[in-house]
Amino acid sequence: DVVEFATKKPADRLAAIKRSLEALGYGQSPYLRAFQLQVKNEPSKVEARVLPPPTLLYANKKQVSLSFGAGAWDMAPNKFYTNASVVSGWAVLVCSRQQFWPPAKVDVVARAFSTGCTSTGIVGVTGSPTIEWADPTSDIRVALERLGGAHSRKFGKPPTLLVCILPSYGAPIIYRGIKHFGDVMHGVATQCMLENKCWDKKLNSVAKPSYFANIALKVNAKLGGVNVVAAPKDTGGLLGDPNDPVMILGADAIHPPPESQGRPSFTAVVGSLDMFASKYVASCRPQTSKQEIIDDMADMTREVLVDYLGYRKHAEGKEGGPKRMIWFRDGVSEGQFQQVIDHEIPKIREACRSLKMDPKITFVVVGKRHHVRFFPESSAGSDRTGNCLAGTVVEQGVSHPVEFDYYLQSHAGLLGTSRPAHYNVLIDENNLQPDALQQLTFTLCHVYARSTRSVSIPAPTYYADIVCSRSANHYDPRGPFHPDSYDANSSGAKRLEDAKAYFKNVHPTTRRRMYFS
């Protein structure tokens, strides 16, 4: 059973690995004996240490101290560090018939949503929203325009936030239309909720408050707020100083399935705006199918740098670009490291030169596709699931003997055996100390906007992956081209040409916010 295998507890997985080695009988191999090689049945022992968790800041700079190695925290009763505001009201679209979702039921969900947002500090999600129903098989754009029109007639302005309740089946198609309408066409924030998540059918009641509190995490970021900030002292001395600006960036590429014919790949770059690296903007592009090296690295980097300059000038009252750039690049195999050095990093420098900047660059590749697992030697070094504690870092024994790399297990295990991320530093013009970079990496895993848990990779890397996965939303659902469609008569070059021609950037208003949260 695949699920049972994937969720094996660490102790059970280690025992299974040992049994497999005994069954393979490497010690009996005449080929290994001929070369005087031996394979031990016991795992290698390596030294590890656990990094201290960062102190997190919420509204009024109230500090929240985390338990050592826990990797999770409860933000209640604190409010977001910077609260977003719903200026011109909010509206709800129910993608179902009224017989299944009568007004009273929608009102209960709307009140729970409002409470979840208000309790975390979001301003303006109060009162009765404008509500419309839509047939899930109909054109979602028409329904959204009808909802916006009804709200404008009622309040004199279009809504700041659209909340959409989606059916359990067929949701991806509806979701894509909603996101294209909000993110690309009109620049209005949208938040979708599945009907079987916001309403408990078994109990026939609204979902628990924790569900709506988690939804509020996404809403606040989409509306321009900042959920949480890490104390500058816990960033390796790299963040929080407006006179020594550091920009944190993430990059990723996502590819179509192996059996696809000529479908384009998509790439993304995200960059921090504020001095705490908690607020990000993103840029996305289609490129040649299954090509990992990012062709448009210069253009996308320039885009986020322009946004950085604007934010720094108007929000922080400072001039000039970053003095240091720290990149976290996902998805690159070891065999492609030199290609990244030869092709992507020069394009980053090109983008900086075009804006008359010359920051020092540190470029780190984040790897998750490996087979290294760490098992704590005793229960004192493990969490409740038997995995290593969040913040466990290993830089000896299994790391490269010469190059700058390390393994960091930044998240707490939930099911199965946790996989650490492998960090390879390709260039380091900032001459960062290993301790400082490792602490910064761990801290960035705590400022992921969607969660109150430390995640497995730094937030900018996570965001870049999300932006790539949302790439289909940039295409008009009613248009002539969609990246997931298949045309046997179309060549890969023609499909890439069409992908670039029909690709639409997000609305300028959306672009300045974390629409991908």
Image (cartoon, grey):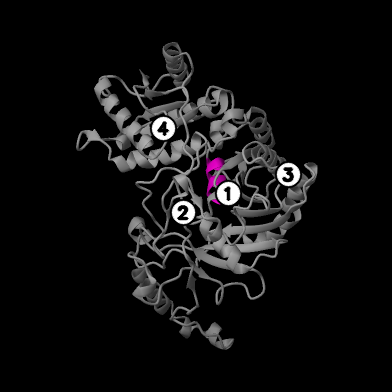
Tell me the kind of residue under disc 3.
Gly
Is any atom of residue 258 visible in this view?
no
Q: Residues within 10 Å of mark 1 (few under 14, many from 20)?
A: many
**Mark 3–mark 2 CB contact (< 8 Å):** no
Upstream in sequence: badge 2 or badge 1: 2
Judged left or right of residue 129, residue 321 is right
**Mark 3–mark 4 CB contact (< 8 Å):** no
Q: Secondary structure at mark 1?
A: loop
From the image, tell me which residue sits under label 3. Answer: 320
What number of labels is visible?
4
**Disc 1 from disc 4: Cα separation:** 26 Å
Tell me the kind of residue under disc 4.
Cys
**Disc 2 from disc 4: Cα separation:** 28 Å
Judged left or right of residue 206, residue 148 is right
Q: Residues within 10 Å of mark 4 (few under 14, many from 20)?
A: some
**Residue 241 rendering spot, x and y as whole percentages:** 63, 53
From the image, tell me which residue sits under label 1. Answer: 277
Residue occupying the far left of the picture: 203
Tell me the kind of residue under disc 1.
Ala
Q: Is the stretch drawn in magenta largely helix, strand or loop?
A: helix
**Mark 3–mark 1 CB contact (< 8 Å):** no
Q: Which residues are magenta?
A: 461-469
Q: Secondary structure at mark 3?
A: loop
**Residue 130 rendering spot, x and y as whole percentages:** 38, 19
- The verdict on residue 464 being magenta is yes
Upstream in sequence: badge 1 or badge 4: 4
From the image, tell me which residue sits under label 2. Answer: 56
Q: Split into 4 quadrants, where in the image is the N terminus? A: bottom left
From the image, tell me which residue sits under label 4. Answer: 192
Q: Residue at image x 39%, y 67%?
A: 387
**Disc 3 from disc 1: Cα separation:** 17 Å
Q: Nearer the viewer, mark 1 or mark 4?
A: 1
